[in-house]
Amino acid sequence: MRRIFLTAILLVASSLVVDSSAQQIVKKRIGSYIENGNVVVAEANTTLAVDITVETERIVAGPYAKHAQRLFGVQAPLVNNVRYRIINSNVAIVDEPTYLASENVDAVQYCGSQPNIDDVFPKVLPDRMSKNNLSVDAAADRAAEQIFALRTARLELITAELGDGVYGAGLESALREIDDLEREYLELFYGKRIVTTSTHRYYIPVKPAEFEEVQPVVVPEGEKAPAEVVVAEPKMLPASYIVARFAPNVGLVEATDLKGDIILVTINPTEMSYPESDVKGKVVYRYANNSEVTMSLGHDVISKRVLPIYEFGRTVTFLAPSK
């Protein structure tokens, strides 16, 4: 599939909680404890919200499209066409109460009206000047004559050759009306371009981190095992989630639909230093890992952020509440 060049623009949404201090240590007390006289049972979970804004461009062919080449020397689109393009994308931490209150996994918000293609052009076209029926060829010729007449009138207004001349606000208004009429007639040949946008939101509850398998230490036969065996800490593996699929000719589709390229969110944990646990500690905190969260479409990266992910962090115990 042809590579798609995308513009990744940060989308700010009021219901998304974006931690501007993601590079700093983020922690949360977990377990059962009393706070302000109330018993609190807290967990440290992370839910990602993915916002993808798609621009939909509809080209509706004009009723006289096949006559554009003959009358104007330029070929016009002969069939209706729809193209989709991702213009905004963002990954952020979502506030848990907001996420739990949401009923839909995919919440869609539209900007602009979704047109009915059958109603884009009126049944009675603007070039109809009488009750007599004309053939399509004759009607196209008449519409072309109207376009050239409007251009002549515009030139005469600008050069003050029409009547006694029109000036000031009157001239501006007249030129604007001529422009609107010419555009309306040209659309009969070259069609209409209708652009709308829609924002889709997907929620990703992050799963617990997985680790590389640690190979056991094997002592060769005949050799004495060391008094103390140092076992390397297992390496944390990245996690990936398929959000949806996208293609320029179909737009966003379900993750299981094979019509488009995969939109993938990948969480890559980073190396971090955490406080040491106290073996006698009973106060438990979960420290988040400042992970690199990348969203990609096929081979193209469309969004990259560093976010605190609790599932990739570490649990630490203290004797007293951490300051």
Image (cartoon, helix red, strand yellow):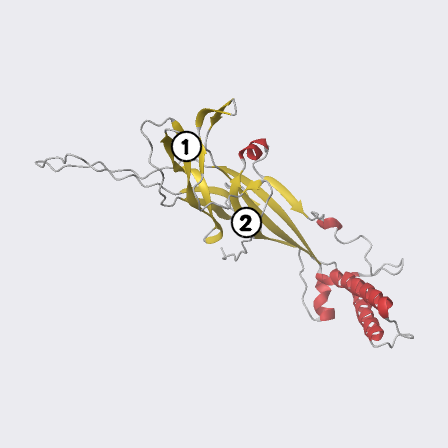
Q: Nearer the viewer, residue 275 or 207?
A: 275
Residue 159 in view, yes or no: yes
Give whichever of discs 2 and 1 has the lower sequence position: 2
The residue most toward the right is 164
**Secondary structure state at the residue bearing disc 2:** strand
Mark 2, Cα crowd under 10 Å, few <14 / some 14-19 / many 20+, is many
Above or below for 106 versus 321: below
Residue 1: x and y, percent? 49, 55
Q: Does 274 sit above or below residue 69?
A: above
For disc 2, the marked residue is 89
Please identify, in this view, whether the residue under mark 2 or under mark 1 is nearer the observer.
1
Which residue lies at the image location 54% right of the left edge and 36% below the top edge? 95
What kind of element bears circle 1?
A: strand
Location of residue 210 in the rendering, given as x and y in whole percent from the top left corner: 36, 37
Res 285 label = 1
- Tell me the residue at 82%/69% (across/down): 150
Q: What amino acid type should be assigned to the residue bearing mark 2?
A: Ser
Quick check: 288 left or right of 249? left
